[in-house]
Image: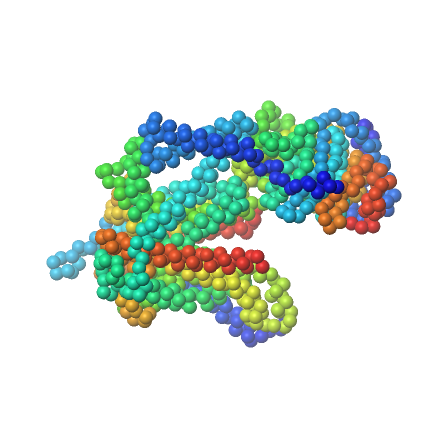
Amino acid sequence: MLVTKPRRSDQFFRVIVTSGGMSSLLILGLILAFLAYRGFEVFRLEGFGLITSSDWSVVEDDNGSVVSQSYGLAAMLVGTVLSATIGVFIGIPIAVLSALFLEFYAGRKIRNFLIALIDLMAAFPSLLFGLWGFLVLMPSAEYWAKLLHKYLGWIPIFDVPAPVFTRSPFIAGVVLAIMIIPICTSISREVFSQTPLDRIQAAYALGATRLAMIRAVVIPFGRGGVIGGAMLGLGRAMGETVAVYSVLNIVYQVNWQVLFGAGGNIASMILLKIGEADRDETNALMAAGLVLFLLTLIINFIANFLVSRLGKTGR
Amino acid sequence: MSTHGEVPQENSQPKPGDKMKTTTTPHSLADLASARVVKAPGTQPIGSGLEARGVHAWFGKKHALKDVTLDFAAGTVTALIGPSGCGKSTFLRTLNRMHEFIPTAALAGEVLLGGKDIYAAGTDVTKIRLRIGMVFQKPNPFPSMTIGQNVLSGIKLAQLKVSNTKELMEECLVRAGLWEEVKDRLGEHASALSGGQQQRLCIARSLAVRPEVLLMDEPCSALDPGSTFRIEQTISELSRTMTIVIVTHNMQQAARVSDYSAFMLSDGGPGELVEVAPTNELFSRPRDKRTEDYVTGRFG
Amino acid sequence: MSNLDQVKPGMPWLPTRKERSQKALSFLLSVLASVVLLFTTGLNGKLGWVIAFFISYVSISFITEYRRAGIPAAQDSLLTSISRFAIFLAIIPIVSILATVISKGWRGLHWGLFTQDMSQATVNDSIETGGMLAAILGTFIMVGLALIFTLPISILTALYLTEIKGKFAGLIRFLVQAMSGVPSIVAGLFILSSIVYPITQSFSGLMGALALSILMIPTVARTAEEVLLLIPNDLREAGLALGATQWRTVAMVVVPAVKSGLVTAIILGVARIIGETAPLILVTGGGDATNFNPVSGPMGSIPFYVWKAFLLGGSEESSYRTWAGILVLLVWVLILFMAARLISSRTRKR
């Protein structure tokens, strides 16, 4: 094998497969290149103001020519991170506990049924979550927001400047939480199910209850994978478009008060603006897309690193 | 009892060429076994012994174990021997209710600890497992804990109250024959130890919750002869204070460490208990033809 | 021997009838307690009731377990009830979503939905006029095209990772995973910036299919890689030992052995993109009229149909239209989901 030259058909095969395999590199590179190319002028115009300023405006005179333009993403960036973080904070505990229930507490039949149901939910399009969130969840979530404000309003982030509770980052966060629960549940469950059986048995043989076993064996083993799963959920929540668009009021002003009906979201803003944007503003939207792309890319890298490190070492 | 402590040592000196798994003539095995003084039941009234009454086990539809009735007197070492697949490990796992972790497992019969059925309704299974410890085939210390934490892990897992943990840790490690090797590195992670040391750490871990019975599932099968020798020594030491049941493939080991031996066999169907006798009798004068065939190395 | 035959396999570790009735009793007790709490404290509404029930259920099971077996068992029961509650919370939305879609969607269903398009109707017209023909057709065309683009790339990627195992395999695996995290709107922006603006300067179904492909590739490639990894190496070696080239081994032995797995990969990929909305809003133009031609003219799609009815509507009719559209989409997702499960469970049995 080593001395003979590979046959021509095999060489050809390897070339084809290798070039096909490189396509993901190519596609990611092209996305980066084109968005950067389009957004370059805006970077030059705004500099770091692109991510530090929150003023996004195009002023035209009566003839329709642009007098001044300003493209700042700070409010959208804060809003994106804020609602995604809320989603992770609400969603991850539910997902991890659900995974523990499915893996260690549920009977076999119930377990299989619930896993199928949760997998189905993971396949639901985000549009569905958006419309359901708008119609069904928002009225309830508004009520929860009012309760939170009533009892926890003394905490700055739960305070509101005016009693407007609809379309808040909190509500977007709840929708995102519901969207990431299925995927994070399956990742956590997958991680927990890889816990070495001999360690589990060792703990039980020492008279451990399930809780004690989980704390001593499952959690130390699965911690990295679960955190990775949470990061994947965070990345997904940040890139979500239509579901957030349906339930969030987009305002170009940084708002940390999660219950107040004003938020930001890069993806939703792109969707909102792209139809009516002129050439410059379209380029600014491309720059916004680039920022979002890089943000999710970094988070996904970290997440995949955490999840795959678990798989490799097996610990 | 003084002979008891010395005899196994004399006989288990690893001689050149005395490999653990080589087949031997019936003579040497019988000699090995009869060199031991059989501990009569009740001479060491520690704990209360264990009695299996008509134990059957199933995995799904498969009948794995049939009607095993066997007494483990307090303070004795009993070896379960037999060819692979004869149900000896399954039987061992029914003795501290580890059997039920296999999803399709089923069971019939009783296992009495101190006269009470451990399978009776309302029994707290975690308390049963505290009284009946287990050492597994593969050493399985908790990798996220240090050596010291591993020894005390049972205390923490079962939330027991212990006044002097340091003394307990030392005592357990001494009894498991590991103290001298690890006393200066208790803060290191357990994975830093060799396989044999890890297995002795697992024994020390089981001892910390002060079980009455210790079940050992082929504890030396993954270890080198030197480590095996150390563990056999440990078993002999421990047998003064507790009841031990050991599953082993190695008949020499059974002959060296056990007071009683139980031979189990499966003819393709469920595993059954063929014969139980004091170890020297079982190896020198087996009553059953099948036992004789097995201990003389004609099959298995 | 006769009494031996009567020995029945039992599971003495399962809760006895008495224990089970005790559990049921504590459940009922918590319901009762939660109702009492509801009337005696300021809690009200569904949320209030759920909280009251949760508190009483957790504490009642904690106390019963504590009295039965002490602190460790009681703490264990705490995790049991909390994790039960968590799965309950995780399941509520899916039940609510299914109920909402079905209850709202069926009123907008009529045969015209599948025979008419929206070229003669606005979203606020009565539901008998207009339908989803253009949308369904558009989705079919775009998903089909996306499949044609995706399939070779994904399978080649999977083959590279499993058969060639080149020195970039680790990197590629990493990038494919990163690609699965690309926000869908970014895929749309990319097609806009790289093809629509500089080259075609018009929206079309083809652009939609390209955007969908970017989202579909990672799903198909990863699933295909997983099934290829399941092939035992003996099979490959057997092929090579017979003197076959690697190419022939892969084509004649490896790929046929995972055929059904590849079908699953395709189904999961289609399920991933069938409901994608944002990139289609950006690049397809979202036509109302039936359009068979993917390279010219705007092309509708089911998600776009729903989105338009949702955004532009305001009337009862538009709401019916929205939810009927969602129902049609959901039925497709369900069909794909069940097909994938059916195939993978059948292969697992073999």
Residue ID at (34%, 66%): C137
> How is the rendered protein coloured?
rainbow
Q: Viewer-proximal residue, C80 or B168?
A: C80
Relative vertical location of residue A10 with respect to residue A192 in this rendering, above or below: below
Residue A23 on image: x %, y %: 44, 65
On screen, residue A78 versus residue A217, left or right, reads: left
**Can the viewer see residue A266?**
no
Relative vertical location of residue A308 with respect to residue A34 in this rendering, above or below: above
Q: In which quarter of the image is residue C111?
A: bottom left
**Tally of numbered tags:** 0
Residue C190 on image: x %, y %: 34, 62
Residue that sits furthest to the front in the current view? C2
Residue ID at (32%, 63%): C114
On screen, residue A271 versus residue A207, left or right, reads: left
Q: Viewer-proximal residue, C251 or B182?
A: C251
Q: In which quarter of the image is residue C153?
A: bottom left
Residue ID at (37%, 65%): C140
Relative vertical location of residue C206 with respect to residue C27 in this rendering, above or below: below
Q: Viewer-proximal residue, B138 or B86?
A: B86
**Can the viewer see residue A115?**
yes
Residue A182 on image: x %, y %: 43, 48
Residue ID at (29%, 68%): C290
